[in-house]
Structure formats: structure tokens, C-alpha cells
Image (cartoon, rainbow, N blue to C red):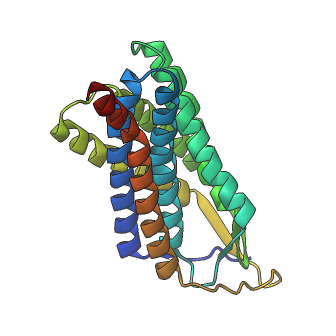
């Protein structure tokens, strides 16, 4: 079995970065509200932040990045495994936000929450890779896998620190741009670790939508999710205004 050459659709690579920045920006704003919330409002803002970061900034970036990966053959995705990777992204992000947001940020809480979140993000990535169905066997360069794990942990620690230490609009925008780079860095490093060997004995895949069309659909659906997350998180402000009035 020969190692397969591959290429990237650079427009989809750029699109993956854009959605990661938009998700990061939304999550940063929502998590600021989480820090000052109480009771049911705190859980609502936690869910909104986890959706924005986990589903938007991380998972959608990952999936569009996967679609940007071109091996010159049709690739299908196992739906249950793909959905499981999405669930992992949301859960580990929510866990990290919860751990760090429990009280005043401490180095140990930041490192613990960031490490758990980073390993979870890596698990999401490699679970998503396992969902690929194609005429090829998938293997990994374990050294590069280790590097991707390190990037995921460091990026997650940085993300959680930024979540609770940025207040001004320009800081949030700058942080979102940096977080987008970090998330993309982890993903494309993980893709670099992938070794794919063609095997004609495996069944050929029939794909209904082209990667470009599917990427646009994911992008638009993610924009809707980010909008809903923003509305969910902003409920607290609306309640406060009504009470004041």
C-alpha cells in the first residue's frame, strides 16, 4: 500500500480560521457573563459558552479543516462518530470553563482545567479522524501526535486564561484572533501526523455533497448556533433590565 499524496483547499483552510475566530469571539464575551452570573443564569451562560467555543471555535473549525484536506478520492464520514466528536468538544470545553470559572483564577485550577480541555480537544480531533470512510488505511506519526497534544493543552490553558482576563473590546478581538490561530495550529498539526495508505480492496465511497458545499453548510449552521448561543447568554442581561425597570 502506497502512502497517498494530499493537498489542501486553501479557501476552506481560510474559512476554518474565520469560523474559529468568530466562535472564539462569541465564547469570550459569553464567558465574561458566566463569571458574574449566579444560579440558573450561571449554568445557562456555561452552556452558551461551551456551545460557542466547543461547537463553533473548535469542532466546526475541525470539520471544515477536514473538508479542506484533499486526497483525490471521495471521503465519507460516519455520522454517529462525527456527532460523538462534536459532543466531546462541547463537554470538555464546558468542563474547562466550569473548573476555571468556579472562583478567582488560580494557576493550579487553570493548568488542571486547561490540561483536561486540551486532551479532550485532541480526543475530539482524533475521534473525528476515525469517522473518515475511504479507500485508505489511516496511521499516525506518534511524534507529531505528541506535538499536537502539547499544542492542544497549551492553547486550552491560554484560552481559559483569556476567557477570564479580557474585558475591553480590542482585547477580546485580539484574543479571538490568537485563539483561532492556536486551534488551527493544533488541527493542522494533527493532520500532519496522519499517514494514509491507499487500499483498493476497501469499498469506494459515494458522497452526496462536494466538500466545498458541505463546508459552506457547516459554516452557515455554525453562524446560527453562535447566534443562538449569544441569545441564550444575553438572557441574563435582559432579565436584569426587566427587574430594574
Residue 191 pos. (x, y %): 54, 60
Residue 212 pos. (x, y %): 47, 80
Task: Return the residue nearer the eye: 106 or 187.
Answer: 106
Q: Is residue 29 left or right of residue 188?
A: left
Residue 62 pos. (x, y %): 51, 58
Residue 29 pos. (x, y %): 32, 38
Task: Return the residue nearer the eye: 71 or 121.
Answer: 121
- Quadrant in the rendering for residue 160: top left
Asked if one can make out residue 114 in the rendered structure from this viewpoint, the answer is no
Task: Return the residue nearer the eye: 75 or 33.
Answer: 33
- Quadrant in the rendering for residue 243: top left
Task: Return the residue nearer the eye: 48 or 76.
Answer: 48
Which residue sits at x=22%, y=43%? 174
* Outermost residue to the front: 245
Q: Is residue 195 left or right of residue 6?
A: right
* Outermost residue to the right: 201
Amino acid at each position: 500500500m502506497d502512502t497517498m499524496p494530499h493537498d489542501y483547499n486553501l479557501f476552506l483552510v481560510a474559512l476554518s480560521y474565520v469560523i474559529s475566530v468568530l466562535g472564539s469571539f462569541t465564547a469570550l464575551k459569553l464567558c465574561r457573563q458566566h463569571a458574574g452570573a449566579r444560579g440558573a443564569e450561571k449554568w445557562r451562560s456555561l452552556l452558551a459558552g461551551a456551545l460557542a467555543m466547543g461547537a463553533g471555535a473548535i469542532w466546526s473549525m475541525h470539520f471544515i479543516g477536514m473538508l479542506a484536506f484533499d486526497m483525490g478520492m471521495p471521503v465519507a464520514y460516519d455520522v454517529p462518530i462525527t456527532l460523538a466528536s462534536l459532543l466531546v468538544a462541547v463537554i470538555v470545553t464546558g468542563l474547562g470553563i466550569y473548573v476555571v470559572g468556579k472562583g478567582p483564577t488560580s494557576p493550579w485550577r487553570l493548568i488542571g482545567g486547561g490540561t483536561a480541555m486540551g486532551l479532550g480537544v485532541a480526543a475530539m480531533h482524533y475521534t473525528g479522524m476515525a469517522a473518515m470512510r475511504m479507500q485508505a488505511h489511516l496511521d499516525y506519526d506518534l511524534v507529531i501526535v505528541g506535538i499536537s497534544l502539547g499544542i492542544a493543552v497549551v492553547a486550552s490553558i491560554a484560552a481559559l486564561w483569556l476567557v477570564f482576563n479580557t474585558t475591553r473590546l480590542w482585547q477580546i478581538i485580539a484574543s479571538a484572533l490568537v485563539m483561532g490561530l492556536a486551534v488551527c495550529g493544533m488541527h493542522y498539526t494533527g493532520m500532519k501526523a496522519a499517514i494514509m495508505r491507499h487500499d483498493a480492496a476497501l469499498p469506494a465511497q459515494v458522497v452526496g455533497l462536494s466538500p466545498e458545499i458541505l463546508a459552506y453548510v457547516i459554516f452557515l449552521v455554525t453562524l446560527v448556533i453562535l447566534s443562538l448561543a449569544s441569545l441564550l447568554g444575553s438572557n441574563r442581561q435582559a432579565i436584569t433590565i426587566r427587574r430594574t425597570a
